[in-house]
Image: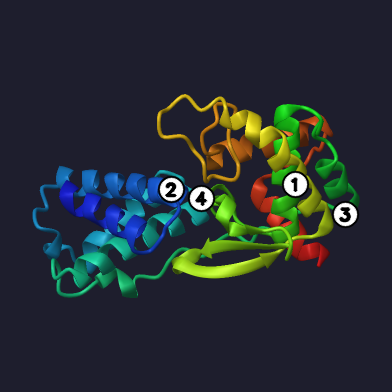
Amino acid sequence: MENLKDNFITYLRAVKNVSPHTLRAYGSDLDQFLEYWQKRGAGNLALADHRFFRRYLSHLQALNYSRSTLSRKLTSLRRFFNYLEMEGVISTNLLSSLSSPRKEKRLPIFLKLEEMLQLLDSPFYKTLLGCRDRALLEVLYATGMRVGELVALDLSHLDLERKEIRIMAKGRRERILFLNQRAVQALKDYLSTSRMELMRRERTKARTTEALFLNRNGSRLSSRGVRYVVAKYVRRIHLIKKVSPHSIRHSFATHL
């Protein structure tokens, strides 16, 4: 069964272009399900019926997960069993007819225009990482792209003359996003100074020549690194709101 899970995760990564963050969540959800399944000595997954899935959902609800977490866990299972059906391991995905818990309605967190401008101006752009961080924040806000799309950017995806940036969106769809003048200038400053210095810090033999945004060691910046950067400057300007990179995406959509 562990092989089935590993094959599913590989399929999502290679074919569906699912982000590393989502893959980790799916892996954790499936580990939890498979442990529950095996403890009950249920055997072949093809034997799972509606009654078993309802018992498992009741088990999760007893653990006091939020409705949004329950919904995500059920989505993970649905996709897994869709994959098993596609591979011929099971004949029918019974989860397709099992309804998800209703999600709590939460208003998305976004920044007012003046707060957003304050955040964009907060990095000390004359420092090595400050210059990078300013470019990173400007690109996030100018395009509204996701964190996974940002960290996957390579130099070849940029066309600063046209003020364009090419990304690989969900489902391996290529999209062209447009940069404003602030983002273009911040990128030019970063590429001509900070990035070159960060490149020299690369410790591995296979130098990261293509990644647009680099960490302090000269390697490709991770999604976790982006979240750290955003949190750092939110603290610097003393914002009380719980702001994440996704909040910048909502701010982009709100300020259009």
Picture quadrant of residue 252: bottom right
The amino acid sitting under disc 3 is Leu
Q: Tell me which label, 3 or 4, sits earlier in the chain.
A: 4
Q: Residue furthest right?
A: 114
Q: Tell me which label, 1 or 4, sits earlier in the chain.
A: 4
CA separation in Å, label 3 and label 4: 31 Å
Q: Quadrant of the C terminus?
A: bottom right
Determine whether, in the image, residue 132 is placed left or right of residue 212: right
Which element is circle 1 on? helix
Which element is circle 2 on? helix
* Disc 1 packing (10 Å; few <14; some 14–19; many ≥20): few
Question: Do the residues bearing badges 3 and 2 touch, measured as CB atoms within 8 Å?
Answer: no
- Residue located beneath label 2 in the image: 20
- Residue located beneath label 1 in the image: 188
**Front disc: 1 or 2:** 1
Picture quadrant of residue 132: top right
Q: Tell me which label, 1 or 2, sits earlier in the chain.
A: 2
CA separation in Å, label 3 and label 2: 31 Å
Question: Do the residues bearing badges 1 and 4 touch, measured as CB atoms within 8 Å?
Answer: no
Q: Is residue 12 visible?
A: yes
* Disc 3 packing (10 Å; few <14; some 14–19; many ≥20): few
Q: Tell me which label, 3 or 2, sits earlier in the chain.
A: 2
Could you say where residue 90 lies in the image, as x and y percent from the top left?
15, 69
The amino acid sitting under disc 2 is Pro
Which element is circle 4 on? loop
- Residue located beneath label 3 in the image: 113
Q: Tell me which label, 3 or 1, sits earlier in the chain.
A: 3
Could you say where residue 12 lies in the image, as x and y percent from the top left?
34, 59
